[in-house]
Amino acid sequence: MNIAKVIVDVPASVINQTFDYLIPEKFRDMLKPGMRVTVPFGARKIMGYVVGITAESQFNKLKEIHDVLDVTPVLTRELLELGKWLADKTLCMYIIAYQAMVPQVFKAQYKKEIVRLTEAELSFDLEKLFAGRDVLPYELLDNSSVSFYQLQKAVQNGDVEINYLVKSKITQKKVTMIKPNQAPYQLEEALLELPKNAKKQWKLLHFFVEHPEEIEQNRLIKHLQTSRSTIKALIDKSLLISTKVEVYRNPYDDKSYPQTTPLELTPQQQKAITPINEAIIKSEHHVFLLHGVTGSGKTEVYLQAIQHVINKGKEAIVLVPEISLTPQMVKRFKGRFGSNVAVLHSALSNGERYDEWRRIHRKEVQVVVGARSAIFAPFENIGIIIIDEEHETTYKQEDQPRYHARDVAIYRGKNHHCPVVLGSATPTLESYARAQKGVYQLATLSKRTNEKDMPEVEVIDMRKELHKGNRTMFSIKLKEKIEACIQNDEQIVLMLNRRGYSTFVMCRDCGLVKECPHCDIALTFHKKINQLKCHYCGYEEPMPVNCPECNSDLIRYFGTGTQRVEESLAQLIPEARIIRMDVDTTQRKGAHEKLLQQFANKEADILLGTQMIAKGLDFENVTLVGVLTADSMLHLPDFRSSEKTFQLLTQVSGRAGRHELPGEVIVQTYTPDHYSIELASKYDYNAFYQKEMRMRRTFRYPPYVFLVLITVSHSNKVKVIQTTQQIVQILLKKVQQDTVILGPTPSPIAKIKDRYRYQCMIKYRDEPKLRKLIKKIIDLFAEDIRKEDLLITVDMQPYQLM
DNA sequence: AGCACGCCGACT
DNA sequence: GTCGGCGTGCTC
């Protein structure tokens, strides 16, 4: 058993296999699968994951592992296997799957350096480059007078050497601790011997006589009003000693969360939790779909099920959408489980995330609450996996590996023989259909815990408003209600359901919209720097004064939808105090929380925002929710647009009347008869489900079929179309009769970074060999991919069809 | 991917 | 002879 099978850090299809390496004697006992190693690879040295250890290899001359980077495996056996499954399922490289499962800091960085090997005089240019040093960063070669060829010769001569380094980004935070270096009585003696004028030293030493235990240097300085130099003086006299101790960065101060105790469950909650608890006790894998209206207390069900799991000595993973990973949510988990919780979300710095991950890895916590990637938490004894707001699109990763957290959760649930709970007020059709078929077990919470009905929803036909001569964005009814609310000292949430919330520039004379010259997308205006910027490629240009097309000076930027709403609202109801939440106002770190806190403190009457305000917020004084344009998403070329509209309307309606005060919802729309708006206003999920399922069946969309999206991109438009066409042809020949191949069609964003993008869609019911076929097709274009910079990406279950 | 190697043509 | 530019093939 002295051969390691290694997946190396080279994301290329020809390298997507294990490589065998000899394990040097010194590593033989400690090297385990799941550890990272550095290995020689060709002329380089690179990082890799050990995925197995064997006694034999079909290769006769093996190189040795250069170094082992971990003391304990970063990937458990289960995660190693999961990564393989993930790569096969989503058609990505193994290394990409593994990298996705560990914190960013484990990604290796590669450095090259030039090392001088001889004392003898080198060439003039080389001597100049070394300038007396023995080691140089390789990059210095670029702007030097030493040519690559010269260097090559020096290497051949044995004068210099190129060193390939693998650097780990890991940064452990260290804190300096101070403690006495001698016994208390010795310190007391030393106290007497201190010079009379060494007052600070005396104070410091005296402190340690009374408190001989170790203390953090910074706290000591603060506490005694002293400085590092004083401490240093005593260290030099070997009375004190300093040590570096590794600490976790703690983004959440555990003490600041008031302890909460389990609430009494309603009969409905009790009924829902019973089978989950049973599965926990019996260690059985089942998927539960917890369909609970907003405010029905799903979270309390989660918390109590988790408590059950903790009592059993097992671990829990809770996934929440990034957007609702607000302090409110964290507070509930930290309040119940205290320091037994690790929180993983995107606002953490790399170092912070690494620390939270290590707390999981070392089994210092039993609960993880986090966004999508938390599904890879390195627990080994999982007792429950919960996905809150199961319908959220953020659970699908949009770049490689293109996985859906729900699929991973169910896979891990099977591995660990534990229940998986999917919770939502508006489950995806996929999940609800599975529950109907009995694949998932359905539990329903139809009542709010406060016993109040869901707020009344009134749908306003904006076409009629227009006929009445009202050209503002606010119906008369909504305006009146807002005013009444403000009169009563109650608060309002207004949502502008708009997807493109960026600011674009348009000429009012000729209608020209400034677009990126490299991408098929409008440029975004950035007020601060007065520049136009492309979000896809980073292209920038100054904001023009005159229209470049017709020279008109009426070229203006169109503010975010919310900005314009804010302005017209200020005209209409001048006394309203408004907090606007959109990309502009929430860019700064923590801005999101700050604005919400202000609203909670009643510093404003109206919270105005985009989708981001629809979820998870809970303000007791909100009695009115207004949706300004309910149908703006409905006409997008996305088969899920009805479902998304229904979900959003239901979610946002749930923001009103969550506590004592009754709530009310006004929905403005130009298509009041559309079933997703009509049924959302009645909170009739079932009818919506039935109706939408019929639509999906008619138009052959999930859950009746599975989708695959293949996107081809290249700088040459003809080549892209040709390639896509070829792919379609091959597919048509090989797939079954009831499989539909659509395309080639231009992608919704037809050009990014000067590369044209075309796509083809596969709709199938049963196509067992499809993965293999697609792999073969990609292999077929391997030449073009390598040499011609052709790119083919495959999304095995696309969510966004872009 | 990224590196070595080898062939070729240009330039001192 | 010296130097730099590509195309090709390999990485345990």
Image (cartoon, coloured by chain):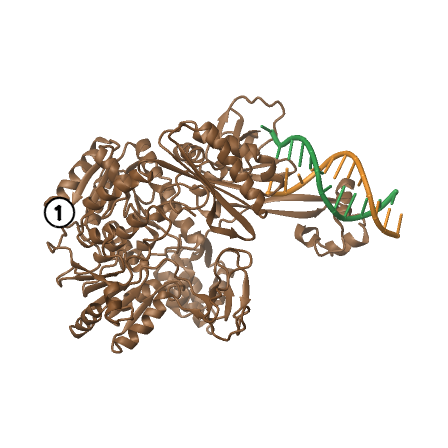
Chain colours: A brown, B orange, C green
Identity of the residue furthest to the front in this view:
A467
Q: Is A290 situated above or below A211?
A: above
* SS type, badge 1: loop
Q: Nearer the viewer, residue A281 or A25?
A: A281
Task: State the image quarter where residue A441 is shown.
Answer: top left
Query: How many neighbours does mark 1 have within 10 angstroms: few (below 14), some (14-19), or many (20 or more)?
Result: some
Q: Is A585 situated above or below A799?
A: below
- Residue position for label 1: A265
Left or right: where A339 falls relative to A70:
left
Left or right: where A447 falls relative to A121:
left
Total numbered badges shown on the rendered structure: 1
Residue A110 pos. (x, y %): 58, 46
Q: Chain of mark 1?
A: A
Residue A709 pos. (x, y %): 43, 40
Task: State the image quarter where residue A764 is shown.
Answer: top left
Residue A635 pos. (x, y %): 34, 53
Q: Nearer the viewer, residue A10 or A57?
A: A10
Left or right: where A151 falls relative to A518:
right
Residue at 17% in and 36% down: A275
Residue at 54% in and 60% down: A539
Left or right: where A53 falls relative to A474:
right
**Residue A561 visible here:** yes
Q: Is A299 situated above or below A4?
A: below
Task: State the image quarter where residue A625 is shown.
Answer: bottom left
Residue at 44% in and 53% down: A351
Residue A631 pos. (x, y %): 29, 57
**Residue A31 visible here:** no
Amino acid at circle 1: Leu
